[in-house]
Amino acid sequence: MARFAIDLKEGKIADNSTDTIIGIDLGTTNSLVAVVRNGKPEAVRGEGNKHTLVPSIIHFSSGGDIVVGDAAKDKLIEDPHNTIYSVKRLMGKSFKDVQNYEQHFGYQVIDDDTESLVKIRVGNKFYTPIELSAEILKSLKSRVENELGSVVSKAVITVPAYFNDAQRQATRDAGKLAGLDVLRIVNEPTAASLAYGLGKQDAQTIAVYDLGGGTFDISILQIQDGIFEVLSTNGDTFLGGDDFDRSIVEFWMKKNNLNPENISQNKHLSQQLRLKAEEAKKSLTSADHFTEKVDEIDCSISRSAFESLITPFVNKTVDSCRQALKDAKLKVSDIQHVIMVGGSTRVPLVKNTVGQFFGREVYDKLDPDEVVALGAAIQADVLAGNQKDVLLLDITPLSLGIETMGGLMDTIVPRNTKVPVRAGRQYTTSVDGQRNLKIAVFQGERDLVEHNRKLGEFILRGIPPMPAGLPKIEVHFIINADGILKVKAKELRSEMEQAIEIRPTYGISEEEMGKMLMESIQHASEDMQVRALLEARNEAKHILLSAQKFLQQNDEILSEAEKATTLSLAKSLQSAMEGEDKDLINKAIQDINEFTAPLAHRSLDKAISEAMKGKKV
Ligand code: ADP
Ligand code: MG
């Protein structure tokens, strides 16, 4: 669909603006953008540039200019304090979350109060990780606009499977800030599977092994009927190609009898050695030996020496794979495909070790740097309506609901529900004249909210005073395609409405989720009893209130004996309610109901005959 659009920044008119939706891999080390053209996903190169990768680095010049990518990478040595990298690690994080690994950053991460989100100091300005990521996204956006000769405004962005709602929302906000309408946030392993065309066939269980520059992730996915379910994730947020480079530098220092302290003092030299080490590592993918010099320092290394240096790291990744399988309750033989993602999986030792562990040949035909972006582009193309045979759905890993009387969990969206989803239920008040209603949202499988995870709460105010049970309050849960939950409450008579969007600052790991599920199974029968008791108590409370009302309203028509019996039955119910025996409570409820039912009829008859008085039938 062609339409005209003006790119204000460039001041030029694009005559063939498209509805192309772009796919973006916003990485810790490198980012890239891809689009589907003529039915094929392609990563986009920069102008006059051989690379598709854009280093996720941002440099701020003293004059206020911002550069991103290779040009910023060059500034890492000359101007380290104004050069920001690895922002992805900070997305959606509070200072408290990151203060323990603050030393990993060459720049200043600050905050005024430890609970709120981090900021990064550059000179005397402060930037949020969202703003910094937006700079990377802007540069990718203009790269693809140059290539297509048209303006793009819609994107799919990938994130690690373990990203929580806060991190996903931050990524989405970064997109918005960069002028992109983020149609969907997709898990990186899901994107990688799409790039390999998985998901169109029968049910499959696959492992996605992603070893990048600074992070390692293993994800076990189940694909069925177009639904990509993350069964488990594991990994190490500080393990990757950077460790390989560092160990090569250490190897050279030993070999040349250099004092590491002296070298680290000399920022320029140590950076040079680091870059040389990366070069050596890359060349050893195909060569058996690397020989070069940096300032008379002998920088040679053989492939076998390199392999023994990195063996401990590679073994650690295998331990994570083992754990991920265990968490997913699967055996190695259950895995049908293993996909390699991330630049560091080019290392032959990595590929072979992983292949051996899973007992099969790994998928490595696609460029491991590009595979996530290619998958994102495919997802984008699906959203654009160009691919009909792929269905992309996610599911809710745990049930979602609200707290009702007595601390009970009332599930509104059960676990394993396909998203996007919209579900609702009606509630009412439990006290006469109640003006406010607290809606507390929980996630989990247990019957009591105290055993589940609280996601947030809000108060629906301004309910017009009405007798208990009369207000009609509709609570709706809406989960969008990114798994972000919106909860709305509305009193139907007064139209009072209140809503929240849930973005818990602290996410939940797969491990915790597994634990919550396990506990719900272990405590199932105990929970059922507790629920039955609480429900009986809620019912009793309701009956007592109506009995009280009944006595007040029908004082004239009831005999003293009837009043006394009703009162004594109410007293027994009251005391049963204070005990732990649900059967006793239910019996007391039954007794009082049976006794008062005929009285209620009489009261009704009287009310009717009053109303008929003086009227001719
Ligand atoms: P991220 O997902 O963290 O952004 P990438 O997937 O882009 O990271 O991986 C970057 C890492 O891959 C760097 O450490 C880089 O040195 C490494 N790498 C790239 N090519 C090769 C290669 N041929 N051999 C070994 N490592 C490589
Ligand atoms: Mg990556």
Image (cartoon, rainbow, N blue to C red):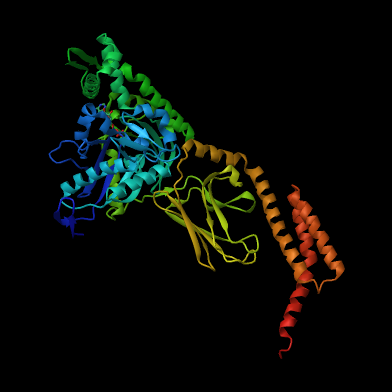
Q: In the drawing, does residue 463 fall left or right of residue 63?
A: right
Tell me which corner region of the image, top left, top right, bottom left or bottom right, holds residue 211: top left
**Residue at point 22% right, 34% down?**
72
Tell me which corner region of the image, top left, top right, bottom left or bottom right, holds residue 613: bottom right
Instruction: Count the marks.
Output: 0
Q: In terms of image quarters, where does ligand 1 lie?
A: top left
Which of 388 and 418 lies nearest the eye of the viewer? 418
**Residue 132, placed above or below residue 400:** above
Q: Position of residue 240 (x, y in %)?
A: 33, 27
**Residue at point 71% right, 82% down?**
611
Q: Position of residue 514 (x, y in %)?
A: 51, 38
Tell me which corner region of the image, top left, top right, bottom left or bottom right, holds residue 167: top left
Which residue reaches farthest top?
257
Q: Position of residue 138 (x, y in %)?
A: 24, 45
If the image is split into quadrants, where does the N terminus sit? Answer: bottom left
Q: In the drawing, does residue 311 fall left or right of residue 39?
A: right
**Residue at point 19% right, 48% down?**
145
